[in-house]
Amino acid sequence: MKTATALALSVLISMFLVACGDDGGSGPSNSEATLSSDGGSSGASGPGFSSDDEGCPDGEGCSSEEEDDGDSSSSRKKRSSSSSATTSSSAAGHAPTLAEDTEGLTCGDDAALVAGTVEAGNSYVCDGGSFRAATNLEKTVGAGCTSYNRNEERLVAGWMKCDASGKWTVPDYPRQALDSIVDSRDGRRYRTVGIGTQTWLAENLDYSDSVATPALRGASWCANNDTTKCAKYGRLYTWGVAMDSATTGCGDGKSCSASRPRGICPEGWHLPDSTEWSVLIDAVGGAGDAARWLKSGQGTNWEYWGNDFLGFAMLPGNWRTASGSFRSFYAAAWSSSETEATKAHFIQFKSDSYAVQPLADRKASGMSVRCVKN
């Protein structure tokens, strides 16, 4: 009987010790920190931080050992009260509210998207004097459709319009209609296109009257020296010919600073300088994606077709190097701006890219000419 009583007492003592957290030495002692349910550690150091404050973000909001009086509740209060106001709310267990995430931001009328001050991955737009979350479509377009920019149009993989309902939509109208001009020198007709504030030839120049313009002799070519290609791709000209060196005095080995030179362009038109090319490129979204809008479309031998929506229709008319070889699957068009006596600016379009590159090459190279209206 005594044996049974002793055994029962032993069992009760064991159960009591387990309930008190002491399993006889196999678990943590009372002096060791244990992981709390919120992912922190319990004990004198307070929840979420180890006893030496390794868990304190950037060393901010934590009491020093000298400040800690050993009372875990007091220590936690000190940390909470000294935390930075900009610490992410999501880190505290909840997503920031709109007010929290836009605190300190200026609400402007430019329809620009702004990042959250707490969560940088969030996007907001000012609409009607207050912030709201940007829609996925607004993030794609890169701007809000707000009360400030109704009827605005933007190029984003196609034209997008901020309509009266406050949403970006695709306008229901065809590609821009093209006008045309006739070159009085040879009767050739060229399509023209207005883009932004400029009007351009929508085709590469194909003027070849070497009797009227003697400088053309030996200084212009068809792509790959195939005379059947000039009608479609236009001619490739040296920079001196493009500038009409006979009237401007500009040519290979000669520095000049002609302003808006007509060059070899039809009357009322001129060879664009590098600034005018930049205006065009900026009008269609910048150099990184400009070729998408300026290249010709399907049925041409670009690896990356353009959408030809604007009608500029840049074709891969080749590029003749100064040594006489042709680079296929390129388009290169002269600028009237030179870099030195033997080199000038041009714009390059590559077959496998939607980027355009402003570069410089020898004036003796052969490139296309796109004229811009005076």
Image: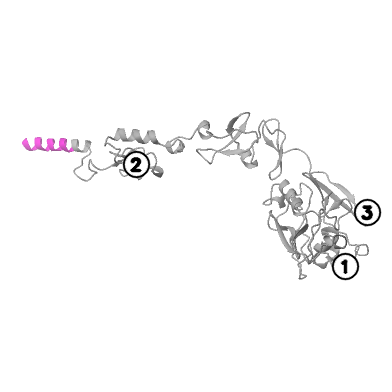
Magenta segment: does it hold 7? yes
Disc marking residue 184 = 3
Residue 295 against residue 360 in the figure, above or below: above
Residue 24 horizontal/vertical position (percent): 18, 43
Can residue 303 be seen in this snapshot? no
* Residue where numbered disc 1 is placed: 217
Q: Is residue 319 left or right of residue 228?
A: left
Can residue 194 be seen in this snapshot? yes
Residue 41 horizontal/vertical position (percent): 32, 40
Of helix, strand and loop, which mostly describes the magenta segment?
helix
Residue 156 against residue 315 in the figure, above or below: above
Q: Are marks 3 and 1 in contact (CB under 8 Å)?
A: no
Mark found first going from the N terminus, 2 or 1: 2
Q: Is residue 15 left or right of residue 71?
A: left
Residue 207 against residue 322 in the figure, above or below: above
Helix, strand or loop status at disc 3 = loop
Q: CA distance from mark 2 to mark 1?
A: 83 Å
89 and 83: which is toward the camera: 83
Disc marking residue 110 = none
Q: Count residues near mark 3 (Cα–Cα under 10 Å), then give few for <14, some for 14-19, many for 20+.
A: few
Q: Count residues near mark 1 (Cα–Cα under 10 Å), then give few for <14, some for 14-19, many for 20+.
A: few
Between circles 2 and 1, the one closer to the viewer is 1
The span picked out in magenta is 1-14
Q: What residue is rendered at 34% in x and 34% in y? A: 78
Q: What residue is rendered at 64% in x and 41% in y? A: 142
Q: Count residues near mark 2 (Cα–Cα under 10 Å), then give few for <14, some for 14-19, many for 20+.
A: many
Disc marking residue 49 = 2
* Quarter-of-image position of residue 49: top left
